[in-house]
Image (tube, rainbow, N blue to C red):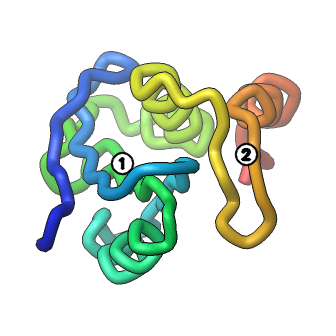
Amino acid sequence: MEKIEYKNISVNGINMHVTKIGEGPAVIFVHGFPELWYSWRHQMLYLSNKGYRAIAPNLHGYGDTDCLSEIDSYTTFHIIGDLVALLDVLELEQLSDAASGPISPMDVRRSRDDSDPNDIL
């Protein structure tokens, strides 16, 4: 796909397949079941042309991202942990909600730490 970079990044004990394009405030696209990063390709290209850094990982068990052997490792809590670890590895100080503005990774961490793992999203 035009200009989109593909990388495998070690996060939270797994190798995560991550795609990214553009420069500027970061926007992370998270796919659902049974999709991949590829579901966001058009939005990534659009936002990168509007001055955003678009990032879309494959969650664990999808595409080229490692699968986990324990079924108990596929919870919302673990997904959030992987995404927070990705933010740390990418050294993102803040994310941008393309619709409403900056979001601090600390806000994401707080939602993970202060909530029931099943109520995070």
x, y percentage for residue 77?
61, 35
Identity, as a three-letter code, of the amino acid under mark 2: Asn
- The amino acid pointed to by label 1 is Leu
Can you tell which quarter of the image residue 38 is in? Answer: bottom left
Quadrant of the rendered image containing residue 111: top right
User: Residue 15, which numbered label?
Assistant: none
Q: Residue at x 36, y 48 (%)?
A: 59
Closest to the observer, 10 or 19: 19
Quadrant of the image containing the C terminus: bottom right
Marks 1 and 2, the one that precedes in the sequence? 1
Mark 2 sits on what residue? Answer: 118
Of discs 1 and 2, which sits in the foreground? 1
Q: Secondary structure at mark 2?
A: helix
In the picture, measured across the screen, residue 77 lies left or right of residue 48, that is right
Q: Nearer the viewer, residue 68 or 98?
A: 98
Instruction: Tell which residue pokes out farthest to the top in this image.
Output: 13
Write the residue at 51% across / 30% down: 87
In terms of depth relative to the viewer, which is nearer, 22 or 7?
A: 22
Callout 1 secondary element: loop
Give coordinates of residue 66: x percent, y percent: 20, 36
* Quarter where residue 113 is shown: top right
For residue 82, side relative to residue 115 (left or right): left
Structural crowding at the residue carrying mark 2, measured as other residues with C-alpha within 10 Å and reported as few (<14), some (14–19) or many (≥20) = few
Is 30 placed above or below 70 here? Answer: below
Q: Residues within 10 Å of mark 1 (few under 14, many from 20)?
A: many
Question: Residue 21 at what x, y percent from top left?
Answer: 31, 57
Q: Residue at x 75, y 49 (%)?
A: 102
Image point (26%, 36%), residue name: 16
Q: Between marks 1 and 2, how big is the CA–CA gap?
A: 17 Å
Task: Look at mark 1 in the image and give the residue it sits on.
Answer: 59
